[in-house]
Image: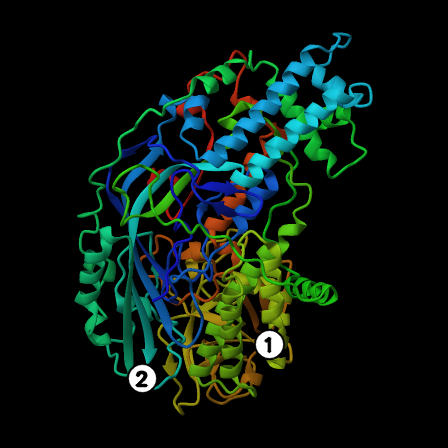
């Protein structure tokens, strides 16, 4: 079984490059960490199922919790980037589920409270030391040069130098040398450093459920017991497969695999796998896999955490740092460095204009998931790439140093994997690196390919499942549902494989994968996807479509098809009694559909949209058939033309038909409708981008965060007035950003 922890190889001192999402090797050589040992675990079920909802199910790519970035746009690309893990939904005829347990063994952290800049420098690698000292020397040279300027202006001396570079040519040269030395350090060591690592392990049991006949396992499940599961909830294998709808599982098999990351969970994962492997599906049906796992925390605790050793500091270093008289003027230096960044995009920008605009409230471009014109955007990306020619894919620089500690002697973290990290910016640790970072996101267009890719991947997973269900329902379509289903499944696979070995923050990697996947669609598939994108609210059919029918027989009251359905006397149709439904679209009380059949939309290559449920397509009640009674709602698998012609009300976001005396409306039902409902019947269908709570909350949090900031943040703010470069750090005052496999508040 293939598994990749995107944090693998990271450790204390690993360097972060926020603009590319790349990581560098550790630059920490000294034993400057302490470790808190508090073992705990988190359980989750991932992969795909139409009968279980959880925050992590049915996602083609996963997002890490948190992200790292120094500018607004780098934070946005971090929030949008997704990695494809073994637990990602794959698409295809079989159902794949991963049961995952993440264990924390301890938290290793740089003990900043017992360090100051001189001590921290002394614990760095020789290369990092040389570059940070070069930047320090350039800063001091500039500081000394500015001391001799005439005091004929209210501006800080560095502003005078920038405004009149010709007059202050020597000083301007010192200013540029300082900028170059800071840039040299950051090109080599990134803009941040890993200062905390949550060490632990990951144990996984993987299950693939398939049919002995090779047919698709995806079926219409209108009477399924649907489970709205919380994170870590224990759901049986049978409930995952078909909601425990059928008690006979002849012809169904389950293939198991296992994986562990970190020897601290190896034995327990192996025992967990062996307790389940070799059993028939019938034997596994009532098993709650997560509940069968042994105690993963038994060997998780880090036994011999390293001790903090105060670094030895050379007197020449302390003397050099002590020459920085005070940091009260640091804001002017940070402003000057930020202005230099801003001028790269606007050669005519003056320092006055920059100072005026940088202090205004940050502008966040609309960070939404609007994908109503998705197919058009993919076509445009493909044309743009065709005009530019094929470019070689960017390789993701992975950390190759897998020794999990920078401490001397035996490594106490061998056998553990990082499950969470915290990164601090170098600017907050060394004041002479002061700069500014643009918070405003004026234009988020550069990140559109990332949104498009993730939306298309979720689309392909939903549509492959839909047409597999249509095939297994033996609907008479006039085209091959299985070929369309396979097309969408292969597209999902291409979208996922297109990100392998790519920089996950490179929008072009996402653009390549999306346009390549669309280019491989067959004619029918492409026409179907075109309509799907045009009628974009179909993506919101998380739990199918709630049907409302109004006819003279119902006395103009809206009714829905009640469970169970029955065969007509001549067995040609199935019907469900029409019962009153209290759903009100102005209120949004979708729970009213809980015990009724939910239908699924089916797009034909001709562009027509029809819906089907138990026994086939919805039948229009006005059709002249002797065995159709108006108090029932009928379904027929052989005659799609009997289905009422549906039109999409895009403003109201529903399908409708008003032909004859009978009115039909079909509303997309969200996942939230089933939350807290004990007897929800039916299956899940689409997990659209808007329903990915992790992604939507990350964008919402980012929008809120940017809205509270100024256009430019100055890193001098980390060094308040009265600070000294000789001061010891205060752990709680050093800003850090978290990235992890579990939520920050849980991991730490």
Q: How crowded is mark 2: few (under 14 residues within 10 Å), some or many (20 or more)?
A: few
Left or right: where does residue 597 sit relative to residue 405?
right
- Disc 2 element: loop
Look at the image and name its color scheme.
rainbow
**Residue 87 rendering spot, x and y as whole percentages:** 38, 61
Disc 1 designates what residue? 521
In this picture, is 508 found above or below 17?
below
Q: Which numbered circle lies on residue 260?
A: none
Front residue of this view, candidates 710 and 148:
148
Front residue of this view, candidates 62 and 532:
62
Left or right: where does residue 458 sit relative to residue 577?
right
Quick one: label 1 or label 2, which is nearer the N terminus?
Answer: 2
In this picture, is 260 found above or below 608?
above
**Residue 48 rendering spot, x and y as whole percentages:** 39, 65
Q: How far apart are marks 1 and 2 (CA)?
A: 28 Å
Disc 2 designates what residue? 212
- Disc 1 element: loop
Residue found 33% across the figure and 24% down from its top: 310
Residue found 65% across the figure and 51% down from its top: 446
Quarter of the picture containing the N terminus is bottom left
């Amino acid at each position: 079984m293939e598994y990749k922890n995107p944090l693998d190889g990271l450790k204390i001192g690993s360097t972060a490059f926020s603009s590319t999402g790349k990581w560098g090797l550790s630059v920490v050589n000294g034993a400057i960490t302490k470790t808190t040992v508090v073992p705990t675990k988190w359980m989750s079920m991932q992969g795909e199922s139409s009968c279980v909802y959880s925050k992590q199910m049915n996602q083609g790519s996963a997002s890490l919790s948190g992200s790292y970035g120094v500018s607004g746009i780098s934070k946005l690309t971090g929030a949008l980037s997704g990695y494809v893990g073994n637990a990602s939904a794959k698409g295809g005829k079989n159902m794949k589920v991963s049961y995952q347990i993440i264990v924390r063994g301890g938290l290793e952290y740089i003990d900043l409270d017992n360090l100051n800049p001189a001590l921290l420098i002394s614990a760095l690698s020789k290369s990092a030391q040389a570059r940070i000292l070069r930047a320090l020397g350039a800063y001091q040279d500039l500081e000394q040069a500015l001391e001799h300027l005439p005091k004929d202006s209210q501006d800080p001396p560095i502003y005078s130098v920038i405004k009149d570079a010709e007059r202050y040519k020597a000083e301007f040269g010192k200013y540029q040398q300082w900028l170059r030395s800071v840039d040299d350090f950051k090109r080599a060591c990134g803009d941040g450093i890993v200062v905390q690592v949550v060490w632990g392990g990951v144990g996984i049991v993987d299950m693939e459920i398939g049919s002995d006949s090779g047919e698709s396992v995806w079926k219409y499940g209108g009477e399924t017991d649907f489970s709205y599961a919380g994170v870590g909830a224990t759901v049986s294998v049978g409930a995952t497969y078909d909601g425990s709808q059928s008690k006979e599982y002849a012809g169904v098999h389950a293939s198991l695999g296992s994986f562990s990351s970190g020897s601290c969970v190896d034995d327990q994962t192996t025992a967990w796998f062996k307790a389940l492997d070799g059993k028939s599906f019938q034997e596994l049906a009532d098993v709650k896999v997560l509940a069968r796992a042994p105690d993963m925390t038994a060997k998780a605790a880090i036994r011999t955490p390293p001790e903090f050793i105060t670094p030895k500091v050379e007197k020449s270093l302390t003397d050099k740092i002590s020459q920085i008289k005070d940091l009260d003027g640091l804001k002017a230096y940070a402003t000057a460095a930020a202005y230099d960044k801003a001028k790269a995009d606007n050669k005519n920008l003056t320092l006055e204009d920059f100072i005026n605009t940088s202090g205004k409230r940050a502008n966040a471009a609309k960070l939404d998931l609007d994908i109503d014109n998705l197919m058009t955007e993919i076509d445009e990306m493909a044309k743009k790439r065709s005009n530019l020619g094929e470019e070689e894919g960017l390789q993701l620089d992975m950390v190759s140093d897998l020794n999990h500690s920078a401490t001397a002697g035996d490594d106490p973290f061998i056998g553990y994997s990082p499950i969470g990290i915290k990164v601090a910016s170098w600017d907050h640790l060394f004041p002479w690196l002061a700069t500014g970072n643009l918070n405003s996101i004026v234009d988020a267009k550069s990140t559109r390919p990332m949104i498009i890719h993730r939306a298309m991947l979720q689309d392909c997973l939903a549509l492959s499942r839909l047409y597999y269900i249509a095939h297994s329902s033996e609907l008479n379509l006039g085209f091959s549902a299985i070929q369309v289903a396979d097309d969408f499944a292969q597209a999902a696979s291409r979208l996922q494989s297109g990100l392998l070995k790519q920089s996950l923050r490179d929008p072009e990697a996402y653009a390549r994968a999306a346009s390549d996947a669309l280019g491989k669609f067959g004619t029918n598939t492409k026409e179907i996807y075109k309509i799907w994108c045009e009628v974009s609210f179909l993506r919101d059919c998380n739990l199918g479509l709630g049907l409302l029918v109004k006819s003279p027989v119902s006395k103009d009251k809206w009714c829905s098809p009640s469970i169970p359905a029955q065969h007509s006397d001549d067995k040609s149709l199935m019907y469900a009694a029409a019962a009153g439904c209290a759903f009100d679209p102005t209120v949004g009380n979708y729970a009213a559909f809980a015990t009724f059949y939910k239908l699924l939309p089916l797009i034909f290559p001709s562009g027509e949209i029809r819906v089907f449920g138990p026994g086939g397509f919805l039948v229009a009640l006005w059709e002249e058939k002797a065995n159709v009674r108006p108090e029932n709602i009928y379904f027929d698998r052989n005659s799609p033309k009997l289905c009422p012609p549906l039109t999409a009300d895009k403003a109201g976001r529903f399908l409708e038909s008003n032909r004859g005396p009978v009115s039909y409306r079909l509303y997309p039902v969200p996942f939230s409708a089933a939350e807290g409902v004990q007897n929800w019947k039916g299956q899940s269908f689409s997990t659209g981008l808007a329903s990915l709570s992790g992604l939507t909350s990350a964008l919402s949090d980012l929008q809120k965060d940017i809205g509270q900031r100024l256009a430019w943040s100055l890193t001098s703010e980390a060094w308040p007035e009265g600070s000294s470069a000789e001061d010891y750090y205060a752990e709680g005052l050093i800003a850090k950003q978290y990235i992890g496999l579990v939520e920050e508040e849980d991991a730490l």
